[in-house]
Amino acid sequence: MLVSDKSGTFQLYAVDRTTEASQQITNDEEGVPYFNVALSPDGRFFHYLKDTKGDEKGHVVRQHCAGGPPEDITPDLPHYNLRGIGFAANNRRMALTIVTEAGYQLYSLDLDATDQVQERRLLYQDKAEFWQAELSADGTLVAVRSTRRTGSRLYCTVVFDAVTGAEVGELWDGPEASVTPTCFSPLPGDQRVLGMSSKSGQKRPYLWHPRTQERTDLALPDMEGDMLAWDWSPDGKTLLLCHLHWAQQQLFTYDLTSSTLNKLDHPDGSYDLSVGPFGSFPHFVSDGCIVSVWKNGANPMQVVELDDRTGNKIRTLFGPEHVPPGRPWHSVTFTSADGTPFQGWLVTPEGSGPFPTILNMHGGPHTAVTDNFSPLAQSWVDHGFAFCTINYRGSTGFGDAFKSQIWGNLGHYELMDMVAARNWLINQQIAQPKAIFLNGGSYGGYLTLWGLARRPDLWAGGIATVAIADWGCGAPYVSAQN
């Protein structure tokens, strides 16, 4: 299953791994969402949110892999936002997390042998935000991440009975930590959850049985940065982990029998497709491979197979055609005015500087830019600009203190980091002092406008796209602190 804009709009594609043949399945005039699309375990149906002109409100539909019209699986519900789709391994139950005017709602849907919905049950409803819908292999339990303990984007993991809706267990590591589920064990009868906790200040994997409350925090070498839990092998013996440090990814497997960590020798670059709280991550398949998206600064996104023992690239399953190679990205480190180090990525055109320069800020703010192919960045470089994108304070993957330092004081530390990056680019004779332009979208658009308003003397201009420019609650904090 793939979502690609190969045709000009995002459409669903089916890829046969035995023949490497791909087939476009949908031809939706408005395109389909490129995140939170789920394939049923039997491989017959795609499921995604069918919305209206990208407003992210609609109904989940199922689309047969052989083509044909999509079918609404919740026709009697009001339009909703989607926050999670999950399936039991036996393909007899699915779960949905949706948002309506009534709040966040978790449903289980019983399926027959033809994947038709036979019964739908509302398991849980709350005004507090919750996401995901991870079902156990036998379909009896469903897990979500909830903000009910803190009221902010710090989560606890809650597990419910998928038939009665009774709460089975909760895992919470206190008001300063976030605990999220990744998936249940793939083995029938094994109801352990694999997930991540940030109780140490950095994300680390755990295994937890919600019925017995038995918990194991994996014994890992002491290393800086997050260790992300991405998947559980079909035989239940191995975990796929990703060490994220200084915005660079290194994949590992973890043998549950011997409690050993194995570093994979994979190509440099990024292996996840994170879209806010949604994401598409590498996963094991049954024939000894890891399937993943992959890209880096010089190579556009493609779907690859990696050997699950070595990490070596086996082949490319799907990728763009006739894309010229880009200029590579280089990781750089800056030091802000208060002594805080932070990281960014730099790509420069051929020749020697100084160049006119784009200083880019990502959206979020709670995300991070990794080694990533950006057509926008490459376009600027093709026109003789240097391009620098920074993981300013508020970004993830640099510890909880780095992420939360901006809370209640929006704009202050981010602008400090923007100015520090500007000064470094000038001192390194990369940027022309009078030709540095700010750029960003969403929260990055807000920072573009903020930088232009607060320090207009430093920038030649800026381009803010879909900028957050009307802070209803954030503005009093900004004006009071800055």
Image: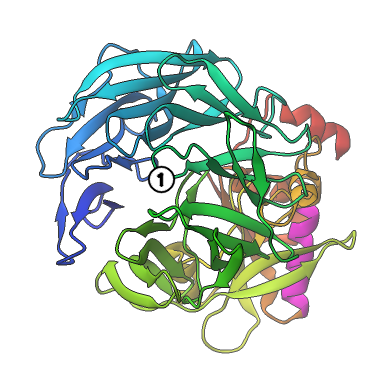
Left or right: 127, with 204 as reference point? left
Between 163 and 250, the residue placed more toward the observer is: 163
Instruction: Give the farthest residue toward the right.
Output: 338
Q: Position of residue 56 (x, y in %)?
A: 39, 30
Between 204 and 254, the residue placed more toward the observer is: 254
Vertical arrangement, residue 163 with respect to residue 424, above or below: above
Left or right: 171, with 67 as reference point? right
Between 233 and 396, the residue placed more toward the observer is: 233
Q: Position of residue 200 (x, y in %)?
A: 78, 49
- Magenta span has 426? yes
Residue 387 visible, this angle: no
Left or right: 251, with 69 as reference point? right
Task: Say which amino acid is labelled 1.
Answer: Pro
Q: Position of residue 157 (x, y in %)?
A: 60, 32
Vertical arrangement, residue 299 with respect to residue 138, above or below: below
Q: Which residues are magenta?
A: 415-427
Quarter of the view holding residue 53: top left
Q: Position of residue 6 (x, y in %)?
A: 24, 58
Quarter of the view holding residue 333: bottom right
At a point 55% along the width and 89% down the height, the residue shown is 351
Please name the residue that numbered disc 1 is placed on: 186
